[in-house]
Amino acid sequence: MPPAFGAYLGYDSDAVRRLAGLDGWVGAATPRVGRAFLPGDRWSRIEGEPGHLQHWATWRKARKERMFVLNVPMLDRSEAHLPDSVVRRELRRGADGAYDRHFRTLGRRLVGLGLSDTVLVIGWEMNGITYQHRCGPDPDAWKQYWKRVVRAMRAVPGQRFRFEFTPNRGRDAIPWTRCYPGDAYVDVIGMDAYDHPEGMPFKEQVAEPYGLAAHVRFAKEHGKPVSYPEWGLYRNGDNPAYVRGMLGWFARHRPLYQTISDYCPHGVWLCRDNPRSSDVYRKLVARPNG
């Protein structure tokens, strides 16, 4: 069986409907992965406030082979672009246990909905600067906080969660290896890998420091499966060579799953701006062997 695949199509009930449309579009292959984000503007949403996850629970339970992947912010005001001093203070508070209760609440809600086997992408892209849960201001506090999150959620009765560590491809603001919290607290090592910067061919995306090849090596050294929660076109426009390269990479390295970000400028189905890449994606994904 080829690696499980899907797409990010939104996090609301319409996203579930769109998954059915993607299934019809790709033809012979069947998307088995549903992926969503918890909004990070306030803690009640990071807790998976009532009603937010019910539609995904219904989708997941309809077929046993399906996989639900959920991105979970580590801090509220997650895209407020707060200064490093605030981030450092918040990471240290998290490391001291100030936010454990929010993650216990999320864990209980997921188990109660029948989503006890969810793959949880905690604090994604921590090596960058987009999110408040970035690692750079205090890597040691970040790692201790990650451990507290995992311990809090593993303590929820009935859980079978898998915890995924997912940096951006490349070095970004800090080498992502400096943020790795340890094998006992990580089940999957992912990578978000878009087609950028401008002019960089796929083979350089593989070979660059902290790039695709380094990711696979690191995961192998730590005995973990790889995954690709976010990937897609970006700075190089409609680039079928990139799509061909990524799908070939998945076929060789057999990730736990891969989910393209299917909105413009990244996507190949809902986004109509990339017709040549769309044709390559559809042809290669539809092959029974990936």
Image: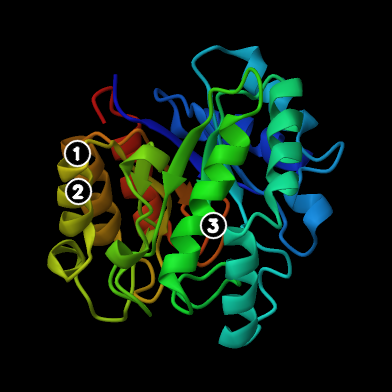
Q: Say which residue appears at 44% left-offset and 27% top-offset.
A: 27
Q: Which mark is residue 145?
A: 3
Given residues 274 and 65, the one toward you in this image is 65
Estimate the x, y position of residue 84 in percent, counting from the top left. Answer: 56, 85
State which quadrant residue 57 falls in: top right
Badge 3: how crowded within 10 Å, few (<14), some, or many (20+)?
many
Callout 2 secondary element: helix
> Can residue 186 be seen from the camera position used here?
no
Q: Say which residue appears at 19% left-offset and 48% top-offset.
A: 216
Mark nearest the camera among 3 and 1 is 3
Estimate the x, y position of residue 231 in percent, counting from the top left. Answer: 40, 56
Estimate the x, y position of residue 154 in percent, counting from the top left. Answer: 56, 31
Mark nearest the camera among 2 and 3 is 3
State which quadrant residue 60 falls in: top right
Callout 1 secondary element: helix
Q: Earlier in the sequence, mark 3 or mark 1?
A: 3
Q: Which mark is residue 216?
A: 2
Q: Say which residue appears at 83% left-offset and 52% top-offset.
A: 44
The residue carrying mark 1 is 253
> What quarter of the picture does the N terminus occupy?
top left
Q: Are marks 2 and 1 in contact (CB under 8 Å)?
A: yes
Answer above or below: position of 183 versus 81.
Answer: above
Given the image, on which type of amino acid does mark 1 rest?
His
Given residues 138 and 108, the one toward you in this image is 138
Find the distance from the CA under tag 3 to the CA under tag 1. Answer: 30 Å
Q: Residue furthest right?
A: 50
Given the image, on which type of amino acid does mark 3 rest?
Tyr
Find the distance from the CA under tag 2 to the CA under tag 1. Answer: 8 Å
